[in-house]
Amino acid sequence: MPVGAKISQGDDRYTPKWVFDGLGITFDLDVCAPKGGIDWIPALKHYSEEDDALVQPWFGNVWMNPPYSKPTPWVEKFLAHGNGIALVPCSQGRWWYKLWAESDAVMPMPYNMKFINPQGGFRMISFQTSLFAIGQENVKALHSLDTNRVR
């Protein structure tokens, strides 16, 4: 496994179903799925940690909720791919400002958003997250979610 691809145990937080219900689109690829995928994420294919998505080819419209402990390589690959939606934490890291500058749209998520843990329970995280979209279909999906203002 390449350096930086291993995630910490604390990174296993799954995006809740209501986000995908609101977006209303199907993704071709979920690049940061747990082994076996997640049944409520509308992706035709997924890469798990064992697949090492950072070295795999990405294709089509991508969903990405990367490991928050080391988002930089994921964000770089997402931007290079140029088609998808990413859910990432707000940060003062250079990667965040690059994502802000190069994405077509961004929408902050609710401050009290609850993620799903591997056991199926709800878990809040201690920082704000945002959805970043690249591609017109994905920008339209952010507007469909209508959780906050899209910029």
Image: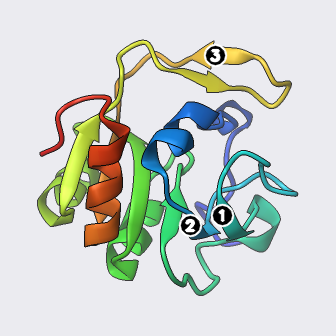
Q: What colour-coding does the image apply?
A: rainbow
Q: Amino acid at mark 1?
A: Ala
71 is higher (above) or lower (below) than 46: above
Find residue 123 and name its label: 3
Instruction: Bin the neighbour count of mark 3 within 10 Å (Cα to Cα): few under 14, some 14-19, many 20 and up.
Output: some
Residue 138 appears in the figure: yes
Q: Amino acid at mark 2?
A: Phe
Mark 2–mark 1 contact, CB under 8 Å?
Answer: yes
Residue at 41%, 58% in the rendered image? 85
Residue at 67%, 50% in the rendered image? 41
x and y percent of residue 145 in the render?
A: 37, 40
Q: Secondary structure at mark 3?
A: strand
Find residue 27 and name its label: 2
- State which quadrant residue 139 falls in: bottom left
Which tag is nearer the camera, tag 2 or tag 3?
A: 2
- Residue in front for this viewpoint, 17 or 55: 17
65 is higher (above) or lower (below) than 98: above
- Residue in front for this viewpoint, 103 or 139: 139
Question: Is tag 3's residue or tag 1's residue first in the polypeptide sequence?
Answer: 1
x and y percent of residue 59 in the render?
A: 54, 84
Residue 72 appears in the figure: no
In-image side of 115 versus 126 (left or right): right
Q: Secondary structure at mark 2?
A: strand
* Residue labelled with disc 1: 43
In-image side of 35 versus 71 (left or right): right
In-image side of 130 versus 10 (left or right): left
136 is higher (above) or lower (below) than 140: below
Residue at 35%, 24% in the rendered image? 128
- Residue in front for this viewpoint, 12 or 94: 12
- Residue in front for this viewpoint, 138 or 54: 138
Quarter holding the N terminus?
bottom right
